[in-house]
């Protein structure tokens, strides 16, 4: 159950992040900060998965 919920929520995070990066990236060159920011959706998804797995165990 936690797997499905995490992927359902993370899909919206990845879509939103992708759209933001496209808009910002159209006017700028790729820099270190943009590359590091690409890890952000993964970290957010990981935190959500931890939270939901603990919630499902209860």
Image (spheres, rainbow, N blue to C red):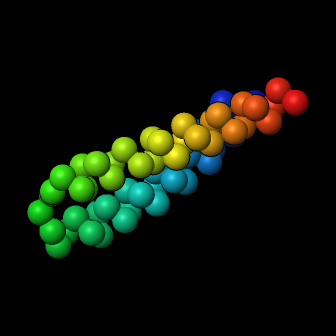
Residue 45 image-quadrant placement: top right
How many numbered badges does the structure rendering display?
0
On the picture, is 29 further left or further right than 15? left
In this rendering, does residue 30 appear at all?
Answer: yes
Identify which residue is drawn at 25% across, 56% down.
34
Residue placed farthest to the top in the image?
57
Residue placed farthest to the left in the image?
29
On the picture, is 40 further left or further right than 24? right
Identify which residue is drawn at 62% across, 48% down.
9
Image: 58 above or below 10: above
Asked whether 28 or 36 is in front, the reply is 36
Residue placed farthest to the right in the image?
58
Image: 21 above or below 45: below
Residue 5 image-quadrant placement: top right
Identify which residue is drawn at 11% across, 63% down.
29
- In which quadrant will I find the C terminus? top right
In this rendering, does residue 4 appear at all?
Answer: no
Identify which residue is drawn at 69% across, 39% down.
51
Residue 35 place in picture, x, y as percent: 24, 49
Residue 11 place in picture, x, y as percent: 54, 47
Residue 30 place in picture, x, y as percent: 15, 57
On the picture, is 51 further left or further right than 33? right
- In which quadrant will I find the N terminus? top right
Image: 35 above or below 1: below
């Amino acid at each position: 159950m936690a797997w499905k919920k995490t992927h359902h929520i993370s899909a919206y995070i990845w879509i939103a992040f992708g759209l933001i990066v496209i808009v910002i990236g159209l006017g700028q060159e790729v820099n270190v900060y943009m590359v590091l920011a690409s890890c952000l959706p993964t970290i957010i998804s990981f935190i959500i998965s931890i939270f939901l797995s603990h919630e499902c165990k209860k």
